[in-house]
Image (cartoon, rainbow, N blue to C red):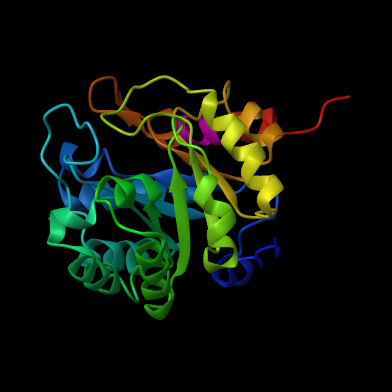
Amino acid sequence: MKKVSRCEAFRRSPLPVINPSLTTLSPFLRAGNRAEFIERAKMARQAGAKTLHLDIFDPRYVDTGGKPTNMDIFCPDLAGELKREVGLPVDAHFMVRPSTLGGHQKFNSYLQSFGGSADFMSIHLGAFIQDSLCFDNILVALAQMKAAGSSAGIVINPNEGPFLAEEIGSAADFALAMTVIPGDGGRGFDTRGLCNISRLKALGFPNLVAADGAITGDTIKAPFDAGARWFVVGSYWFGSEKNGYKSFDGMKLAYDAMIEACKPRG
């Protein structure tokens, strides 16, 4: 298999090669108004964030614990405002079945609507499989993301294998391995995601393998050792509505703990 090239947006951005951390902001807009949400994103940047990650979910695909979709809030308008106000690349992670939007053609139009707002976009292979869509539909969706000016990624859940990744090859700029089963926050770290990271590396995603789910100062070392260099971090970085949101000092301590955990020992 031909190795995928480093995603152009990643190469152009100020992200370091080692230990870039994406921050997932998705749980936090619902807990306050938009201005407070953007303020937390600004603090995250000051604490060390290099990109901003938006989880855009569909309850038909993700167990949200009864919560409705956030697609109406986590929209191109919000992504664009984050990019302008915070000054970081935005990564839109679509946990959405194409059928929810009326089929793959309307789903592709939805992806295109994020053009100019999202620097990275990623889709779940499992969402396409649940809709009985074929390999060609996935390739078309990746092409639509690239046509919109974004880097295009694929996402694999812990209970799925990266069997399609080998076929997709260089059509994807990066791969994201979930280390939790997607759903309502607070789920535990799923070690099956580590196997997927190792296999994705072997398939030729040497620089752009991401890990997402229950990433903390204690769990980050395992996906790092498996080969991930891009990490989506949620409640460990920000805190939560239930337990209280962290101050800037708390965010900085969390960031420093993750970076320290990935440093070579000895």
Give the farthest residue toward the right: 266
Q: Give 156 or 71, whichever is nearer the viewer.
A: 156
User: In front here: 171 or 118?
Assistant: 171
Would residue 240 appear left or right of 237 to someone viewing this image? left
Please give the name of the residue rendered at 71% of the width and 32% of the height, measured from the top-left corner: 225
Image quadrant where one finds the N terminus: bottom right
Question: Residue 65: percent from the left, percent from the top?
Answer: 17, 26
Q: Residue at x 61, y 54 (%)?
A: 208
Residue 253 rendering spot, x and y as whole percentages: 54, 30
Picture mark count: 0
Q: Which residue sits at x=60%, y=28%?
A: 257
Residue 132 in magenta stretch: no
Is residue 57 visible to the viewer in this orientation of the structure?
A: yes
Q: Position of residue 134 (x, y in %)?
A: 35, 59
Please tell me in which quadrant of the rendered image residue 74 appears. bottom left
Of 58 and 167, nearer the camera is 167
Q: Which residues are magenta?
A: 249-256
- Is residue 108 depicted above or below 225 in this figure? below
List x then y, in percent, for residue 142. Answer: 42, 67
Q: On the rendered image, what quadrant is the C terminus found in?
A: top right
- Closer-to-camera residue (135/226): 135
- Which SS type dominates the magenta stretch? helix
Report if residue 48 is visible in the image.
Answer: no
Side of 51 where 29 appears, left or right = left
As for residue 250 lying within the magenta part, the answer is yes
